[in-house]
Amino acid sequence: MKLVTATLAALLAGAAAQAAEAPAGALACSGCHPAASGVDAAPARLIGMKAEEIEAAMQQFRSGARAATVMDRIAKGFTDQETLAIAAWYAAQSN
């Protein structure tokens, strides 16, 4: 019974994280980044990526350390706090 209760609690916690409202700007990413797994696209799939990886990429785009066609300009439009919130939200999502 304890295992069932613990499993149910874990499932509910995961559902709550997914159901959390996306932070400002996060949903715009899906215009280029695929939402579904198994999609072969040049932009990386953000759902389930580690927040640290997303944050680092955004910082690299913002500073010009990472080559980009449009992400350098997009990244400059977000504050550090917005970037952290978006990265954490995508890391908490699963598909």
Image (cartoon, helix red, strand yellow):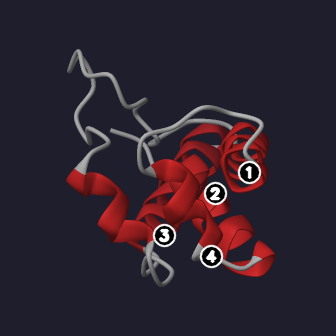
Q: Nearer the viewer, mark 3 or mark 2?
A: 2
Cα–Cα span, label 4 and label 2: 12 Å
Residue 89 seen from this side: no
- Residue identifier under label 3: 16
Is tag 1's residue or tag 3's residue first in the polypeptide sequence?
3
Indicate the amino acid at tag 1. Answer: Glu
- Residue identifier under label 1: 55
* Residue under the image location 65 percent in, 47 percent down: 6
Cα–Cα span, label 3 and label 2: 17 Å
- Residue identifier under label 2: 87
Using the rendered view, name the quadrant where residue 25 is placed: bottom left
Question: In front here: 1 or 35?
Answer: 35
- Residue identifier under label 4: 78
Is tag 3's residue or tag 2's residue first in the polypeptide sequence?
3
Asked whether disc 2 touches disc 1, contact meaning CB atoms under 8 Å apart, the reply is yes
Asked whether disc 1 touches disc 3, contact meaning CB atoms under 8 Å apart, the reply is no
* Residue under the image location 77 percent in, 36 percent down: 65
Is tag 4's residue or tag 1's residue first in the polypeptide sequence?
1
* Residue under the image location 66 percent in, 47 percent down: 61
Indicate the amino acid at tag 3. Answer: Ala
Question: In front here: 76 or 14?
Answer: 76
Q: Nearer the viewer, mark 4 or mark 1?
A: 4
